[in-house]
Image: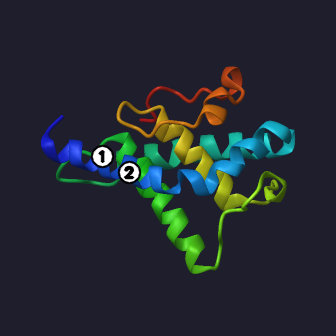
Amino acid sequence: MGWADTLADRSARRWFETIAGRIEPGWSALSADPALWSRYEHHLAAVTDAVHVEGQLVGRQEPVSDLVLIASHAHDVWTAAEKEGWTPPSDAARWAPSEWTGLRLLACFRLAAAEPHGPKLSREAALLRRTTAEPRKRVR
C-alpha cells in the first residue's frame, strides 16, 4: 500500500468517524426490531453489490481500496439525503423500516469496519447479531 492509498483510507475512515455518533441510535434500533434488521440485511447486500460494480466497471488510473469505495458510496448517500433535508433519527424509537438512508449508512459503516483500515464499530454495533451479520471479508 502506497502513501496515497494510506491517505485515502485514512480520509475514508475519518469521514466514517464523523458520522458515527449521528447514526449510533440505529444500532440500538436494529437490536430491537426484526423488521428493521431484515431491511438492514438488504442494504448490506446492496452496498456490497454497488461497491463490486464500482470497483469492476469504473475505470481508474490507480485502483482504490474497498474502504474508499464504501466511503464514497456512503458519502454520496449522505450528501444527497442532506440536500433533501434528511437528518438521522436522533433516537432508536424513530428508526423504522422505511428509514432508507439511515439503514444504508449503517450497512456502509458495518462493511467499512470489516476492512483492514476501516473505522471501529461501537461496542453495541460490534456485538449486534454477530452470527448472522458478519459481512464478507472483502466486498470485491
Mark 1 lies on a secondary structure that is helix
Q: Which one is in front, 102 or 18?
A: 18
The amino acid beneath tag 1 is: Arg
Q: How would you rate the neighbour count of disc 1 (Cα within 10 Å): few for under 14, some for 14-19, many for 20 or more?
A: some
Q: Quadrant location of residue 65?
A: top left
Residue at horizontal 79 percent and vertical 56 percent from the top: 95
Question: 140 or 25: which is nearer to us?
Answer: 25
Q: Which image quarter: residue 72?
A: bottom left
Location of mark 2 (residue): 14
Specify whether 88 is left or right of 116. Answer: right
Quadrant where the N terminus sits is: top left
Residue 4 drawn above or below residue 124? below
| Image quarter hosting the C terminus | top left
Q: Which residue is mark 1?
A: 10
Q: CA distance from mark 1 to mark 2?
A: 6 Å
What residue do we see at 14% from left, 39% from top? Answer: 2
Q: Residue at x 61, y 32 (%)?
A: 123
Q: Residue furthest top?
A: 131
Density class for disc 2 (Cα within 10 Å; few <14, some 14-19, many ≥20) is some
Left or right: residue 54 compared with residue 83 = left
Hey, what amino acid is under mark 2? Arg
96 is higher (above) or lower (below) than 65? below
Q: Nearer the viewer, residue 83 or 52?
A: 83
Q: Which mark is residue 19?
A: none
Q: Are marks 1 and 2 in contact (CB under 8 Å)?
A: yes
- Residue found at the far bottom of this picture: 84
Is 44 on the left-hand or right-hand side of 15?
Answer: right
